Image (tube, helix red, strand yellow):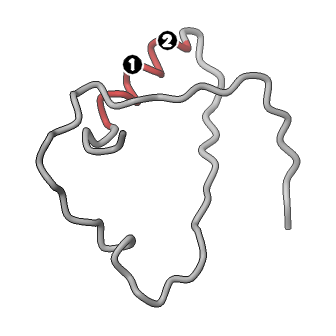
């Protein structure tokens, strides 16, 4: 069963830390040989009074190795 989502604004949230210069190994999901498809997902949050605050919190939990 699908849902309809109307996007009013999209924001790319980057990690708060610098990307390390060392080589990092793939995650368990990325290294599965049998996966022949991409996994896409959409995170939907309830409205907040301060969207900058939500963005700052998401930056803190984002892994630093994601460019």
Q: Is residue 49 above or below residue 8?
A: above
Dot 1: few (<14), some (14–19), or many (≥20) neighbours within 10 Å? some
Q: Is residue 16 left or right of residue 12?
A: left
| Residue 6 drawn at (x, y percent) | 85, 35
For residue 56, which numbered disc appears in the image? 1
- Residue in the picture at 22% in, 27% down: 17
- Residue in the picture at 41% in, 87% down: 33
**What whole-number distance in Å separates the C-alpha atoms at marks 2 and 1?**
6 Å
- Residue in the picture at 67% in, 27% down: 10
Q: Quadrant of residue 23?
A: bottom left
Dot 2: few (<14), some (14–19), or many (≥20) neighbours within 10 Å? few
Count of numbered circles on the image: 2
- Pick the residue in front: 21 or 34: 21
| Residue 64 drawn at (x, y percent) | 25, 38
For residue 52, which numbered disc appears in the image? 2
Q: Are marks 2 and 1 in contact (CB under 8 Å)?
A: yes
| Residue 42 drawn at (x, y percent) | 64, 49
Q: Secondary structure at mark 1?
A: helix
- Residue in the picture at 33% in, 31% down: 15
| Residue 41 drawn at (x, y percent) | 61, 55
In the rendered image, which quarter contains the N terminus?
A: bottom right
Residue that lies at the very extreme toward the bottom in this rendered image: 34
């Amino acid at each position: 069963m699908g849902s309809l989502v109307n996007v009013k604004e999209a924001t790319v949230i980057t990690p708060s830390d610098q990307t390390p210069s060392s080589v990092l190994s793939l995650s368990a999901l990325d290294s599965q040989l049998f996966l022949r498809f991409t996994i896409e997902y959409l995170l939907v949050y309830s409205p907040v009074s301060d969207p900058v605050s939500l963005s700052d919190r998401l930056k803190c939990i984002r892994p630093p190795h994601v460019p």
